[in-house]
Amino acid sequence: MFKPTTIKDIAKALNLSTSTVSRALRGGYEISEETKKIVLDYAEKVNFKRNPIALSLKERRSYSIGVIVCEVANQFFSQAIDGIESVAYSKGYHVIISQTHDSYDREVINVEHLANRSIDGLLVSLSAETKDYSHLEKLHEQGLPIVFFDRVLNSMNTHKVSSNNVKGAFEATEFLIKKGCKRIAHLANASQLSITAERQKGYEEALKKHNIPVDDKLIKYCKHGGRDKMEVEIAVREFIDHDPPDAIFVASDRLSTGCLSTLKKYATNSNILVAGFSNSELVELLNPSLSYIRQPAFEMGKKATEMLINIIESKYPIEEFESIMLDTTLHPNGA
Amino acid sequence: MFKPTTIKDIAKALNLSTSTVSRALRGGYEISEETKKIVLDYAEKVNFKRNPIALSLKERRSYSIGVIVCEVANQFFSQAIDGIESVAYSKGYHVIISQTHDSYDREVINVEHLANRSIDGLLVSLSAETKDYSHLEKLHEQGLPIVFFDRVLNSMNTHKVSSNNVKGAFEATEFLIKKGCKRIAHLANASQLSITAERQKGYEEALKKHNIPVDDKLIKYCKHGGRDKMEVEIAVREFIDHDPPDAIFVASDRLSTGCLSTLKKYATNSNILVAGFSNSELVELLNPSLSYIRQPAFEMGKKATEMLINIIESKYPIEEFESIMLDTTLHPNGA
DNA sequence: CTGAAAGCGCTAACAT
DNA sequence: ATGTTAGCGCTTTCAG
């Protein structure tokens, strides 16, 4: 069995008390250099590691933070996670990742699970299906630090990090307009998500600026965020099957690729331009091609984590919360 | 601050002893139905959750397993992780994911970190850079259960799960040959990886079967597994810059896409066929197109996790270890 | 059927 | 400078 050396083992072997060993190990100034050296050398020799579980129990904190995302396979989220880890590790925190696959049920289960694991704080990007927020609100009221990123819950009073979705969507839509498109459809994510409303706003503002009427029939929502491939295919086919648009503005990564697949399958020579949010590294290789809006995912992950650790380590309850917004970049592509 | 209810709180509130509460909570048969009901109801009411950290300390195990992969953004690994989670969750284990980004240093740090977090077992796919295995061997000798998947360490006596790389590579190479290709290059991963040797073996066997000589100049290794984009670009350009091959067989996911990018950039109309390992869901949309070998990633994750939990929960030390091999599937594509 | 007490590994008053 | 002790939350003998 896996039975690591404990402080007690060392104390016994060296004929010292556990507290002396403990203090020597953490370099307490009250311990003589001599003893310190003996202890340190011996600890080294037997490959001693303090048991973080015991520590957590004592300190009532685990030095780990939980992350709730829809899926790590999505490049936006894996890049954000890299950002999260970079900050967390440097401050001595462990990161526990949990995927909802855009399912509300999984989100509830995972949040509970993480809370049970005594995490010190939670980084959340909501699942596409989530409409009821009580699982998060309950924990927040109990004092668990929570920071939202990307898909935020506006009604909760805490730090939030997102990209400037309105502006990003506006730029992409205007780009399509300047390419000469008049009928621009919008393939959107689940309607209750913060990003959905924001991106739709940018889309509509661009249309209005250029005197193109907003047509509700040209807007479709995918309530499972594209987790179900068929829902994307159905939505796109409704666009193209009669009176097709000359462009589609797509609101998120998984939807963008789903949209391209459908176009490739059912509208091979259609010349429909597509612009959409995507952080995939493969975008440049795609055909049909995709003009894409890229979010500063790594940066967002970093910022959110810094904010979270600030709350966790703050001596006093925080009253003032920030909402940070980072700019996206548009990458034109294709004909 | 975040201070959950404890068993002690309940005991006090109900005027019982902590042991009675503890037993009632876990349905101990020695407790009267009446008391049990009172305790359960009250626990429900105050939203009591047992503290898993205290439990871990007591039981000397954490019901969590660590996973070491190079990166979650790689679809092969994210699919494998889904498989891992599906088994782990159903058996009551938590999954802690850790990325090496194919760096040896990160691998060492992460392994130590996980071991310190008192995980009950470790699932490992080696980083491309790793040549020294003492960080893993040390833990294994101390009794930590370890199961390898995909990039296995053959010299360690434990369970292993991989796909049938020799066969997969053979089929892909033979497919290229049957397409009429004669000069088939091989873009390989770091030479010390198990998968590299196996896939090269399949490649060479296919060539030999069809009486094509193996040419060392047509084989290039990427020692950072493509983490450094330039290394892929350099390798591919060496292939194509003079006397280009008519096909390239690529040994892994990141390399496959890197190879396509380079071809798109420097050999747009070359007609070089590419076949490679990839579990990306975007493959069908790529241009240039890629014939791909797909690994049963989800299945591999499941199997590896089942094996790991078997070791963890086994009453007796395990002596007989298995090496499972799963079949890949070839998906022809393009002209 | 219920309670008291010890112990998991570690730290931190509080002695000495 | 070092030792003793209590306690973090929970389970589990051992008593009653």
Image: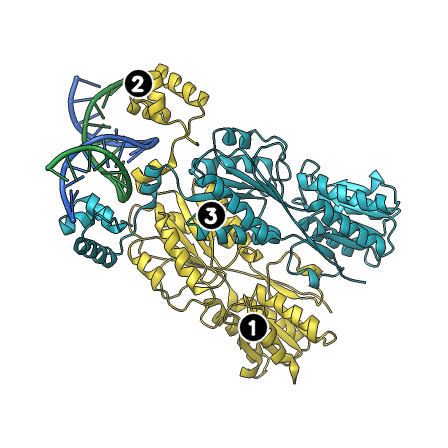
Chain colours: A cyan, B yellow, C green, D blue
Q: Residues within 10 Å of mark 3 (few under 14, many from 20)?
A: many
Look at the numbered discs 2 and 1 and tell me whether their residues touch, using CB distance below 8 Å: no
Q: Do labels 2 and 3 share a chain?
A: no
Image quadrant in which the C terminus of chain B is located: bottom right
Q: Which residue is drawn at 33% across and 61% down?
A: B137
Residue B231 - label: 1
Q: In this view, does B234 lie above or below A237?
A: below
User: Which of the 4 image quarters holds residue B24?
Assistant: top left
The residue pinned by badge 3 equals A95
CA–CA distance between discs 1 and 3? 30 Å
Return the x and y of residue A238 as percentages of the image width and height. 81, 44
Q: Do labels 1 and 3 share a chain?
A: no
Q: Quadrant of the N terminus of chain B?
A: top left
User: Which subunit holds the residue at mark 1?
Assistant: B
Amino acid type, mark 2: Leu
In the image, taking residue A252 as reference, residue A26 lies left or right, namely: left
**Tag 2 residue:** B16
Residue at 41% x, 51% y: name it.
Answer: B307
The amino acid at mark 3 is Val
Query: Where residue B194 sits: x, y (%)?
Result: 45, 67
Query: Which chain does the residue under circle 3 lie in?
Result: A
Label 2 and label 1: CA atoms lie apart by 68 Å
Q: In this view, does A121 lie to the left or right of A201?
A: left
Q: Where is residue A302 in the image (x, y as percent from the top left)?
A: 54, 50
Label 1 crowd bin: few (<14), some (14–19), many (20+), radius 10 Å: some
Looking at the image, which is closer to me, B47 or A147? A147
Number of the label disc, if any, that sits on residue B218: none
Per the image, label 1 sits on a secondary structure element best described as helix
Mark 2 surroundings within 10 Å by alpha-carbon count, few (fewer than 14), some (14 through 19), many (20 or more): some
Between the residue at mark 2 and the residue at mark 3, the CA separation in whole angstroms equals: 38 Å
